[in-house]
Image: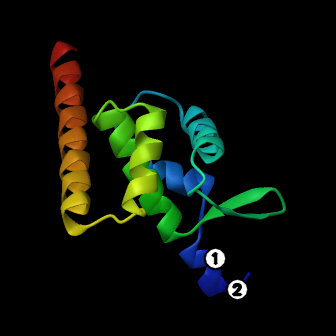
């Protein structure tokens, strides 16, 4: 794998950081979640080299959409499968804006919780 390819592919731990919301679940649990999603969603196809997973931007976009639909929209896995199968995995600008807005909202909520905890002490 060349340096350029290494930069364009992310390891599972890097993807976890990208997807990290204000969940208090450990990153290890989140990597288990990604591996589970791999078994459930045929659209997620990381490259495996020496038993390490490498995700390209297309896979990361799919994971962002899955996370958004499951965690933020409260959908079931079967519901998300239907959407992914029907939408041809297109994530348009509105989807990206919504996802970005939600990430900002989550970060603000996290900051607010930290501030409240600091005020309690």
Q: Residues within 10 Å of mark 2 (few under 14, many from 20)?
A: few
Give the residue drawn at x 16%, y 31%: 112
Instruction: State the separation of the CA atoms marked 1 and 2.
Output: 6 Å
Give the residue drawn at x 60%, y 86%: 4
Q: Which numbered marker is on residue 103?
A: none
Q: Is residue 106 above or below residue 91?
A: above
Give the residue drawn at x 57%, y 77%: 7
Q: Residues within 10 Å of mark 1 (few under 14, many from 20)?
A: few
Q: Quadrant of residue 47?
A: bottom right
Local secondary structure at mark 2: loop
Q: Position of residue 120 (x, y in %)?
A: 18, 13
Q: Quadrant of residue 3?
A: bottom right
Q: Is residue 108 visible?
A: yes
For the C terminus, which image quadrant? top left
Q: Are marks 1 and 2 in contact (CB under 8 Å)?
A: yes
Q: Which numbered marker is on residue 2?
A: 2
Which residue is tagged 1? 6
Front-most of 93 and 82?
82
Front-most of 50 and 96?
96
Front-most of 82 and 95?
82
Q: Is residue 64 visible?
A: no
Q: Position of residue 68 (x, y in %)?
A: 34, 44
From the viewer's perspective, is 29 left or right of 115? right
Front-most of 84 and 107?
84
Which residue sits furthest top?
120
Q: Position of residue 75 (x, y in %)?
A: 36, 32
Q: Is residue 57 above or below residue 119?
A: below
Give the residue drawn at x 16%, y 22%: 116
Q: Quadrant of residue 54?
A: bottom right
Q: Is residue 3 above or below residue 86?
A: below
From the viewer's perspective, is 17 left or right of 56? left
Q: Position of residue 111 (x, y in %)?
A: 21, 36
């Amino acid at each position: 794998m060349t340096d350029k390819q290494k930069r364009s592919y992310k390891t599972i731990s890097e993807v976890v950081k990208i997807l990290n919301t204000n969940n208090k679940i450990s990153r290890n649990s989140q990597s288990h979640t990604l591996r589970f999603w791999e078994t459930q969603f045929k659209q997620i196809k990381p490259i495996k080299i020496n038993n390490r997973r490498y995700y390209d931007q297309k896979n990361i976009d799919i994971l962002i959409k899955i996370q958004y639909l499951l965690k933020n929209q409260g959908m079931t896995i079967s519901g998300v499968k239907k959407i992914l199968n029907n939408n041809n995995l297109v994530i348009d600008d509105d989807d990206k804006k919504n996802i970005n807005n939600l990430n900002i909202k989550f970060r603000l909520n996290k900051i607010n919780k930290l501030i409240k905890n600091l005020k309690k002490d």
